[in-house]
Amino acid sequence: MTSEPDAYPSVAEVAAAASAFARSRLVPPSALREIGRSRQGRPLRLLSVGRGRRHILVVAGPHSDERVGPATALRLAHRVAADPALHAGADASWHFLLCLDPDGTARSEAGPAVRRTPAEHFRHAYRPPADEQPEWAPSIRPPDDQLPESRALLDLIDELRPELQCSLHGNDLGGSWVQLTRDIPGLAEPLGKLSAERDVPVQTGTYDALYWTVSGPGVYLMPAPGRRAQFDSLPEDVGRSTWIHPHRHGGMTALFEVPMWASPDVADTSPHPEPGRALAGLAALLRQHADRTGALLDRVRPLVAGGGPLVRVAEGMAPIMRSVAHDWDHLDPSPVPLTRAHLHALDIAARRISLRATGTLLRLLDGLPSSSSETRLRAACAAQHSLWSTELASGHSLAWVPVPVQVDLQSETVLAAFRLLGE
């Protein structure tokens, strides 16, 4: 593990490695095929291993700023091929969609290729609005205006009828955790063991799944249809996402999260002494950041007419901050007793939104002429980004999780879920 490069492979590198794998005579029956094209014409590649009746679909790269997935998919392909118990012995076929959003992921490849600081990560990572994220888009866009990536994934699910769909996600700061559309009893135990062996905390407080049922430490179950699933500020409908599509074939979906930077406080289950006061402080912080972001955007906007997707991302950031602040104003009383882990995770979420905003503004300014006014504006955005990055780092004990460790933890947790599902 330690000899592997501490960097995420690019979309091109993943494609080349998958092609070499499929041509190898040392692996069981395997195939590499194209199942569609992205909005910008990039191929959506599927690598399959085995010929069993039980189909397992692994989806990498659903969020373009979460880059661990493609590397994990390749690792899993090699693990499955090397262990007949995982394919022939389990009557299983494994299918690896190597990157669901190659266009966005290519944007996130800008900047340093090796380990980044949090400031560099948010400076270069690209995350599109929810209606341009292939897993979420079906729940937001009209049926006649679906993304080609979403359609390709939905068609693939209908073709394979997978028993288990594994969606490979990642979080920039926090711990390891799993979201399930149906329970896999006992999964919390291997998740905890695998994480502890790699010095990664299990995330017991989350922003995404605050309204979800807890199956065990770090394992969250989607609420039943009709029950609240998330904050009002989030436009997505979990029940109409691609995660639920396997249910029509008797299958289910599991989402696997591993962090770039581990933050041990997301595992602190002790009650927070003043959750209402802490929430009010975070809401106030978000409104301050929204005002500052809006003021900077007003200066940037006239310079970047026709700036494409980045402009839309930037335009949405301040409204998102205010909407989230409104949610947190009304989170006391909370649907669950708020622990220190919950408030720690909410603090990370608030600061993450702000840093995505300043990072996007800086990317919009890249390449513009260096006139005195633009130089001052770029310096103002960079200073704000640096300040908020410093505040994030100073408020949370962060430890970089090397990319090989992220990949190892995620792939082994997927295999643990697969084994438990087959029992």
Image (cartoon, rainbow, N blue to C red):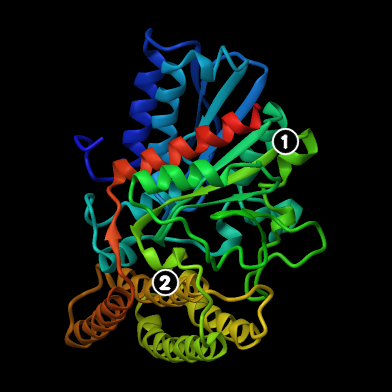
State if disc 1 and disc 2 touch (CB < 8 Å).
no
Query: How far is mark 2 from mark 1, CA to CA?
Result: 33 Å
Judged from the image, the secondary structure of the residue bearing numbered disc 2 is: helix
Q: Is residue 383 above or below residue 3?
A: below
Residue at 44% across, 30% down: 76
The type of residue carrying mark 2 is Arg
95 over 294 or under it: above or below: above
In the image as oriented, which residue stretches furthest toward the right?
226
**Residue at image point 37% right, 41% down:** 407
350 or 261, which lies in front? 261
CA neighbours of label 1 inside 10 A, class few (<14), some (14 to 19), many (20+): some
Question: Which mark is drawn over residue 251?
Answer: 1
Tell me which label, 2 or 1, sits earlier in the chain. 1
Q: Estimate the x, y position of residue 215 in percent, counting from the top left.
A: 65, 52
* Residue 363 x, y percent position in the rendering: 32, 68
Q: Position of residue 192 (x, y in %)?
A: 47, 48
Question: Does residue 333 show up?
Answer: yes
Which of 278/294 is in front? 278
Question: On the rendered structure, is 14 left or right of 266?
Answer: left
Secondary element under disc 1, as helix, strand or loop, is: loop
Residue located beneath label 2 in the image = 352
User: Is residue 69 at least partly visible in the picture?
Assistant: no
The N terminus: image quadrant = top left
Q: Residue at x 40, y 71 (%)?
A: 356
Q: Badge 2 local density, few (<14 within 10 Å), some, or many (20+)?
A: some
- Write down the quadrant of residue 145 in the picture: bottom right
- 44 sits to left or right of 198: right
Residue 52 placement: quadrant:
top right
